[in-house]
Amino acid sequence: MRLSVTSHRVGSSFHGVTLVQDTTSGIVYVKKILTIYNAEVYRTLKNHPVPGIPEIIEMIEEDDRLIVIEEYIGGQTLRAILDNGNLFPEEEAVRIVEQVCVIINDLHSADPPIIHRDIKPSNIICTPDGSIRLLDMNAARKVVTGKSEDTQLIGTVGYAAPEQFGFGASTVQTDIYAIGVLLCELMTGVLPKERIPRGRIGRIIRKCTRLDPKDRYKSVRDLLDALAAGHGYSTGVTYSSPGRSYSGIKRKWKYMIPGYRTGSPVNILIATSVYAFFLSVVINLQVKDIPPGIVLWAVRLVFLIFGLGILFFTGNYLNIWDRLRISRIRNPLIRLFVVLLIDAVLVVAMVFAMVLTAVAMGVYKSKYF
C-alpha cells in the first residue's frame, strides 16, 4: 500500500531529509531523497525489519534517486550529548555499545551480511526510554565475497576503517572498527588516536581499531563476549540468533556494592579489606562523654549508615554520579574535586547527625543545648 503524505514540511529539511505527516493517520515519518544509496539494502530492510533501525514504510526508485519513507525516531543523538560537554562512564558507554552491537549483529546475520559503514554518534539516537536506535543506512551495502576494494569511498573521517579509503574491501570488521572508535569517544570525548582509556576497555578498543581487519574481532558476537567478560553490572542487552542465545551481563550483579562489580579477585580482596576495616571501626567506635550502652550503639549506627553512604557514593554505586551529572564533567581533576567536596559535606552531616542522636537520647543536652 502506497503511503500518502502531506506536501507541507513538518520539520526542517537537511540533505534531502524532511519530516512529513500522513494525512490520514497524522503519524509523522521521515522522508529521504537519496542520490547515493544501495536499493537492495533498503529493500531487504523493508521486507525484513531489524529491531533498533527505523522501519522502512515505503521506497520508490526513480530518476537515479531513491525516495524513502521511514519511521521517525524521537530522542537525542549521541553527538548532541557529547557536544554539550558530556562524557559517559564506562558502564553506560558499554551499555550503549552493546545495544549497537546487537543491532549490527542482526545486519551481519543477513545473507549476505549487511554492513552499515557509517556508525558514529550522530547516527545513533538515545530515545526517551533509554534505548538506542541506529540511523542512516545510506552508506550500507551487502558484503561481496571476493571483492578486493570498495568502489565507493564512503565513511566519516575518524570512524571509517582504512579499507573504506581504498585499502581493501569493507567487511563486518569495518563496522567493528567504528564501534571501537565509538566506545572510545563516549568515554573520553576524543578519538583513539588522541587518547584511549586504560585497562581492559582500552585493550578492547585497540583490538577493534587495528589497521588490519584480520587483527580485529571476528564478529560482533566476539566483541560482545569481550565486553561482557569480567564485568559485574547489568546492561539488559540480549540477542538471539540461530544456534546461539546471548544475554549480555547478568542482572543479579547490578546491585553489587563497589569493589565487587567487576568480578576481579584483586578488587574483591581490596574491597573486602576496606569493608572489614570500616566495620571494625564502627564496632570499636568510642565517643567522648558517651558511656557504653544503647546511646553509643545508636551513634555507631548513624556512623555506619553515613559511612557506607560515603563509601558507596565515592564508588559510584548504582551510577549515582550519573544522576548528579558528575560523570559528565570532562576534566578528571575537577570531577575528583567535586566528589571529594560532596564527601566532605557528607562527613559534616554525619557528625551533626551523631550529635543530634546523642542529644535526642539525653546525652549532651545540658552541655550543648
Image: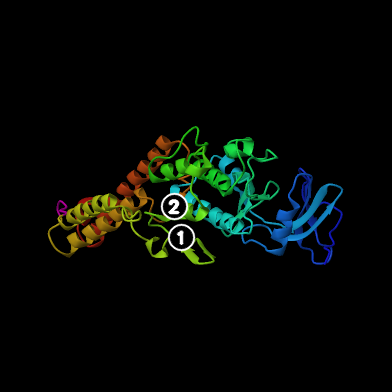
Q: Relative to residue 105, is residue 310 drawn left or right?
A: left
Residue position marked by numbered label 1 in the rendering = 248
The residue drawn where x is 46% and y is 34% is 195
Mark 2 vs mark 1: which is more N-terminal? Answer: 2
Residue 282 versus residue 361: which sits nearer the camera?
Answer: 282
Q: Is residue 288 magenta?
A: yes
The residue drawn where x is 68% and y is 38% is 153
Q: Relative to residue 42, is residue 280 drawn left or right?
A: left
The residue drawn where x is 78% and y is 54% is 68
Q: Amino acid at mark 2?
A: Leu
Q: Relative to residue 105, is residue 69 drawn left or right?
A: right
Residue position marked by numbered label 2 in the rendering = 227
Residue 162 point in image, percent of width and height? 58, 37
Q: Relative to residue 206, is residue 40 drawn left or right?
A: right
Residue 29 versus residue 218: which sits nearer the camera?
Answer: 218
The residue drawn where x is 47% and y is 54% is 222
Residue 257 point in image, percent of width and height? 33, 57
Q: Which mark is residue 54?
A: none
Residue 19 versus residue 204: which sits nearer the camera?
Answer: 204
Query: Within the image, what quadrant is residue 151 found in?
Result: top right
Residue 323 in view here: no
Q: Is residue 112 magenta?
A: no
